[in-house]
Image (spheres, coloured by chain):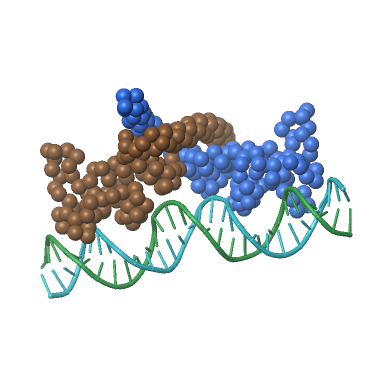
Chain colours: A brown, B blue, C cyan, D green
DNA sequence: GATTAGGTTTACGTTAACGTAAAGTAGACC
DNA sequence: GGTCTACTTTACGTTAACGTAAACCTAATC
């Protein structure tokens, strides 16, 4: 496993935490996705890595964004929606009043969606509880059968 | 708004709750989706409506399944995964020990996924809180500016 | 200096989850 | 009996989110 190929990635630098960079491969392994996916996310405006020559150099900022992106995906958000959130996150304080109010609206929407998800999860968990209980029961029934036979 | 066209759908029948049927259009309006979607879900094995002649007749069982399906979608599950859950729900008690154990495994998986989602939501909510705070702040700054000017 | 292990672009392919359009059927109402 | 309205099937189109393949660059190593 040849690590850090042609040292584009600066060495670990244990002292100054959070100052390291990543190659696309490193990031891919870190999150168990493919480089293709990372490039695609950049194309969709979710990442903006530095360029050193023609190679991409990722910083902690990009890693954080990527993490946020994958979290959003797990929650069923589209990449466009995730980009919205990221832009909110990055440009929150600047812009005129109309912009700010629009942001607050979008935020309220996302918040409502997540509230709905919380409720959905609660309901689904109860249903899974139910199925599991029935499952366990018939399993025990089988076991008792075997003990008797 | 012509309701219940050629009375395939039996009238409301307020007495015996939960005994009514639905046309595809009624169900569609109920959940704010299109008939096409409902037919597609049937094609994917998520619904199994009765047939009266060539028209589909939906019962409460179907409505419940549809509800479960849409809930699953909101949580980012694929239709295949949702079908798995539905089948769990329907066939839980029958099957041999190996089947039952497999079901419990799948259940554990779904459960883990939802636990992860709960955590994801918590984190995202905090981040939204943060953005909103910054937003509100710069909005107030603007307001103060205006008061002064 | 050839190989190799990474990186790059370009471009076409694939899958899920429907949308959309055409063409037919079947009760209800005038 | 013609006109709605809502259902039906069939089939092709579309979009998001990547996968996959080809062809190239480049630094390190043998």
Q: Is residue B136 left or right of residue B61?
A: left
Quadrant of image for the N terminus of chain B: top right
Placement of A108 over or under A55, stated as above or below: above
Question: How many labels sit on residues?
Answer: 0
Placement of A136 over or under B5, stated as above or below: above
Is residue A103 something one can see in this rendering? no
Q: Is residue B83 left or right of residue D2?
A: left
Quadrant of image for the C terminus of chain B: top left
Placement of B115 over or under A35, stated as above or below: above
The residue that appears at 57% across and 42% down in the rendered structure is: B69
Is residue A76 something one can see in this rendering? yes
The residue that appears at 38% across and 40% down in the rendered structure is: A85
The residue that appears at 33% across and 56% down in the rendered structure is: A36
Q: Is residue A16 left or right of residue A111?
A: left
Q: Position of residue A136 (x, y in %)?
A: 53, 33
In depth, the one of B102 and B43 nearer the eye is: B43
Q: Position of residue A28 (x, y in %)?
A: 29, 51
Residue A111 quadrant: top left
Q: Position of residue A48 (x, y in %)?
A: 28, 50
Q: Position of residue A20 (x, y in %)?
A: 18, 44
């Amino acid at each position: 496993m040849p690590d850090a190929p042609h040292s584009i990635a600066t060495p670990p630098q244990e002292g100054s935490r959070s100052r390291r960079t990543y190659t696309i491969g490193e990031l891919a392994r870190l999150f168990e996705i493919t480089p293709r996916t990372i490039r695609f996310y950049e194309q969709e405006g979710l990442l903006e890595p530095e360029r050193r020559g023609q190679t991409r150099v990722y910083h902690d900022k990009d890693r954080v964004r990527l993490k946020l992106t994958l979290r959003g995906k797990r929650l069923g958000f589209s990449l466009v929606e995730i980009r919205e959130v990221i832009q909110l996150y990055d440009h929150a304080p600047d812009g005129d009043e109309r912009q700010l109010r629009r942001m607050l609206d979008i935020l309220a929407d996302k918040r409502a969606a997540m509230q709905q998800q919380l409720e959905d999860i609660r309901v689904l968990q109860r249903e899974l509880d139910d199925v599991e209980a029935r499952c366990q029961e018939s399993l025990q029934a089988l076991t008792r059968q075997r003990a008797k036979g």
